[in-house]
Amino acid sequence: MTGTHAGAPPGHRSSRSLAWRVGTPLVALLSGSLLAVSAANSDGTDLRPGRYTDLAGLVEAEAQDYQRVEDRFNDLTAEVDRLGGDVSDRGVDKLRRRAAGLRDPAGLTPREGQGVRITMSDAPTELVEDALKRNKETKDPEQRLNLNRFVVHQQDIQAVVNALWDGGASAVTIAGQRVISTTGIKCRGPVVQLQGVPYSQPFVIEAVGDQGDLLGAIDDDPLVSGYRTDSLNPQIEIGWSLDAEEQIKAPAYDGLLDLQYARPLRRK
């Protein structure tokens, strides 16, 4: 029974079938009109912008979520410290005194005093371009300049920091961030990452300590001397400045202190 009622005379179409044949094109026409109006009003853009396409808003929301989690963590840490302060016996008091004595050498207390400031940066762009042109025109490979010498690498920064430690620095900072024993220095393109946070050049390194000892350690370090030689080379001129300062401030380290290490998947 397609198109006819049971018992209806042949050739007699049902009103329901007729309505379906007429209504379907009408609905399609109205839908097309609505789509056209929607496209015109949105000018080709999403009518509900911001839900998925507003990347800046998404990043801001994530940052706010992170800040809420961090605030919660700080509140819980303070609560643990408060509750722990109520616990007192000979063993606990001994461990507290020991921990308090380690805070300063661990970099968890601020330091200030006389010291040195060192600024490092990549070579000028025009000298890099000159070197590229010169290397292309020079047939003798030994006469070409190594382009790595025009860029500050993480090993250059690490060499300076190590020299400052050798010179007896009581505190070292990079870009104002306290350097401790677990600080990782990594190059990511044109920036340096400390504890996963990127910092752009110029890279400012400051150290608190005896100026004579710090300057002597910088002069004696062979890796730093090689860098400084390139800074004086008129064909390279990689950025370097060294200043003795009467007042250097090194804030306390305020990052994560948890150590991560490898664990065996199974024991033999």
Image (cartoon, rainbow, N blue to C red):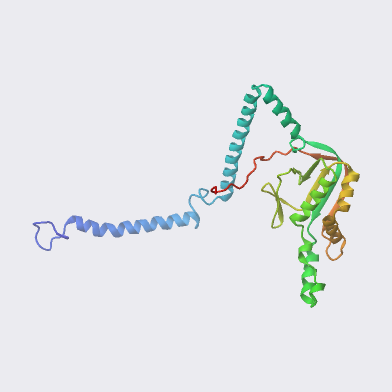
Please determine whether, in this image, residue 220 is positioned above or below residue 88. below
Does residue 170 appear to the left or right of 57 in the view shown?
Answer: right
Quarter holding residue 127: bottom right
Nearer to us in this view, 8 or 225: 225
Is residue 202 in view from this perspective?
no
Q: Residue farthest to the front? A: 268
* Count of number-bearing discs: 0
Residue drawn at x 80%, y 76% as measured from the top left: 140
Residue drawn at x 49%, y 49% as measured from the top left: 48
* Residue 14 locus on image (x, y percent): 16, 57
Does residue 6 appear to the left or right of 77 in the view shown?
Answer: left
* Residue 90 locus on image (x, y percent): 69, 22
Q: Name the image quarter holding the N terminus.
A: bottom left
Quarter holding residue 16: bottom left
Is residue 6 in view from this perspective?
yes
Does residue 124 appear to the left or right of 24 in the view shown?
Answer: right
Residue drawn at x 28%, y 58% as measured from the top left: 24
* Residue 49 locus on image (x, y percent): 51, 50
Does residue 182 appear to the left or right of 32 in the view shown?
Answer: right
Quarter holding residue 182: top right
Please determine whether, in this image, residue 20 is positioned above or below residue 129. above
* Residue 266 locus on image (x, y percent): 53, 48
Q: Residue farthest to the right? A: 212
